[in-house]
Amino acid sequence: MDGSMYLWLKALHIIAVIAWMAGMLYLPRLFVYHAEATVGSELSETLKVMERRLLRAIMNPAMLVSLIAGGILLGYQDFSSGWLHVKLTAIVGMVIMHMMMAKWRKDFEGDKNTRSHRFYRYANEVPTLLMLVIVVMAVVKPF
């Protein structure tokens, strides 16, 4: 791949990651409001639509593009670098968190949520912490 194509792929990867992270930070906030809403209320039903659209139309495609473009970019990395292993581990954590959010969304959709708004407030911090690790590893490459 020539240098220009590499840069376009890197730009696509960054754009997709930003879109994915926007959803990863916003969806748990919607869950906080949803956990406080009365089951069957107009607010609860509106949040169901918002959560489904956010996950399906933004987060899922953005995650796929992030992982595919990032996977291609991996071919240009030195796998003996410790920072890369930490970054990849944090990315696995992000994918797991994404899947957990998809499960929680289904719980809300079926009016089966058993978690409190406080749980979702704490869950909202996990993507932020993972993002910090990923960015520091990718930019600073401390080891």
Image: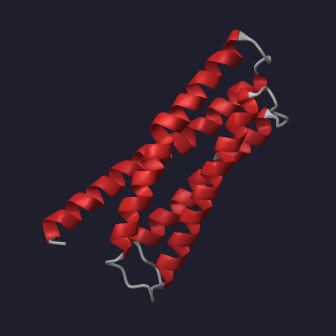
The residue positioned 58% from the left and 30% from the top of the image is: 52
Q: Which residue is drawn at 45% across and 89% down?
A: 80
Q: Is residue 9 left or right of residue 130?
A: left
Q: Where is residue 132 in the image (x, y as percent from the top left)?
A: 52, 60
Of 125 and 14, the residue lying toward us: 14
Instruction: Establish if 61 lies above or below 136.
Output: above
Q: What residue is shown at x 58% (from left), y 57% (from top)? A: 94
Residue 26 vs 129, above or below: the answer is above
Point 40% across, 67% down: residue: 71
The correct choice, above or below, for 84 with respect to 9 in the image is below
The picture places residue 57, in percent across and down from the top left corner, at 46, 35
Total number of numbered labels? 0
Please say if 131 is above or below 138. above
Question: Toward the viewer: 103 or 139?
Answer: 103
Q: Quadrant of the N terminus?
A: bottom left
> Coloring scheme of the render?
secondary structure
